[in-house]
Image: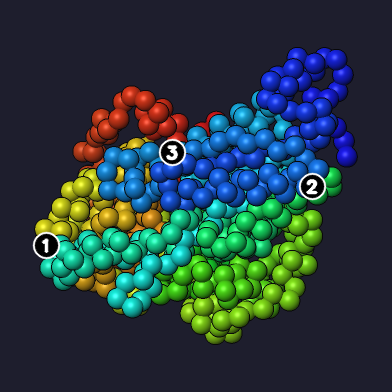
Amino acid sequence: MAENFFCDGVEMAPQRSLFNALGMTHEEMKRPLVGIVSSYNEIVPGHMNIDKIVEAVKLGVAMGGGAPVVFPAIAVCDGIAMGHKGMKYSLVTRDLIADSTECMALAHHFDALVMVPNCDKNVPGLLMAAARVNVPTIFVSGGPMLAGHVNGGKTSLSSMFEAVGAYSAGKISLEDVEEYENKACPTCGSCSGMYTANSMNCLTEVLGMGLRGNGTIPAVYSERIKLAKKAGMAVMELYRKNIRPLDIMTEKAFHNALTADMALGCSTNSMLHLPAIAREAGVELNVDIANEISARTPNLCHLAPAGHTYIEELNEAGGVYAVMNELNKKKLLNTDVLTVTGRTMAENIEGCVNMNTEVIRPIDNPYSTTGGIAVLKGNLAPDSCVVKRSAVVPEMMVHEGPARVFDCEEDAIAAIKGGKIVAGDVVVIRYEGPKGGPGMREMLNPTSAIAGMGLGSSVALITDGRFSGASRGASIGHVCPEAAVGGPIALVKEGDLIKINIPENKLELAVSDEELAARRAEWKPREPKVTTGYLARYAKMVSDSCKGAVLEK
């Protein structure tokens, strides 16, 4: 095995002196230097166990012949940040994580990396960094939370948010809310449904950047520790074979990820993150291709919030590999792609049996013949918008209703909880996009309030912001162009008729072109909501949501 960069000659003696200051032995210094990116912190439930994962990774790296060195990455809990100004600081951390990890990795000339992420922006941020740095890299997440148990059934964070809405509607008591509060989130780990964190950790497996079980083995299982040790050993094999992220994250791999996304029913946030990761890998991934892939990809899973099964059950059913094996029965995947196992996807998934045909539907008996996500267009969203089709009730797949217009999330929530939104309405929340928010807040609070008040099958919500993976119903986000740059959503008036047709991928405002032109002539840009700090810089640099809300170079 080759010695690391810092062992080469007298010129590196100053650097070796600093390794001595770290307590490194000569034997360690001669080994490949492996950076372990730890996302451990004590404020995010999905990250509170990562210290144990990191220790297991270190052992695996050492067993494989490397010298493990830990450095940190930040992570925000979207659930804790939800419903207040803190949510403005969630999406923006993705690029901050990528930037800071790139800086640390390249400044210290690591020979290989093990990324240990878990929650929403942490996973795509580290995947972006992996593509940029492009040294042998493997991912092992902190793992999903076990489902909670309330009133004899399993539950999760989305039910907790919806319980607040149900209480506001007088449907449940304060004692019922407290029951959810105490039991919805029973363990460490990323929230137990197919929300954004688990979506991205599952898609990491599909991209080929994580070992089998990365997305599904529960955080509290001993198997998670074993997986971390295996990841540490595997990265040393990647180093010896010189297999790098850009060898793995190819155009074919991203098409696989989109296909699995449709089958799994992942969070709509994947439509922001996959293009952003692809961009760093030198792959153009236009969200428009999502409908093409969806048209040929059946939806095989209805995990929470779309259904009543959870990640722990997906794991027991065979996990992501079993889903990929089902898809491969109809040749929907590019199985010749390379993965971090050093083998192809075809070799990895061979013999991976679907153990529960209710959790993972067979390819010939899907929940629907089309995928879980749809990209809509029309005069209200000329560039695009996104909906999690698998979480929309049948009666809302086609809907017309009057616009109820709000210029911020808080005003919409007040109207919903105040009983001012009625069946048939289309709630429009604007000026919450990447630039307008700034930060493109998630709208879990208003979607949960709608569901909790019993309006989930009769009220739609449209926004230039985005949604939590925990949102369900006719929740249409990422409207592009956003209101802040003069997109048509800025021109909607109270009472305008909005037409939604998800099967036909259409979103239309029933207003003439002449009337829209007149409104546009009167529209004026708004003063920025934030003028100082990181958010102000972000607002100036961020691209449209349909381009992944990446920072423009």
Q: Secondary structure at mark 2?
A: loop
Q: Residue at x 34, y 63 (%)?
A: 184
**Residue type (three-letter) at the residue carrying disc 3:** Val
Looking at the rendered structure, the number of numbered marks drawn on it comes to: 3
Asked if residue 262 lies left or right of residue 92, the reply is right
Q: CA distance from mark 1 to mark 2?
A: 61 Å
Q: CA distance from mark 3 to mark 2?
A: 36 Å
Per the rendering, the mark at residue 64 is 2
**Residue type (three-letter) at the residue carrying disc 2:** Gly
* Viewport quadrant of the N terminus: top right
- Residue 288: percent from left, percent from top: 52, 57
Q: CA distance from mark 1 to mark 3?
A: 33 Å
- Residue 185: percent from left, percent from top: 38, 60
Q: Residue at x 42, y 47 (%)?
A: 44
Q: Residue at x 36, y 71 (%)?
A: 149
519 or 486: nearer the viewer:
486
**Residue type (three-letter) at the residue carrying disc 1:** Gly
Query: Label 2 neighbourhood size at 10 Å, few (<14), some (14-19), many (20+)?
Result: some
Asked if residue 14 lies left or right of residue 283, the reply is right
Q: Mark 3 = which residue? A: 92
Q: Mark 1 = which residue? A: 419
Of label 1 and label 2, which has the lower sequence position?
Answer: 2
430 or 349: nearer the viewer:
349
60 or 39: nearer the viewer:
60
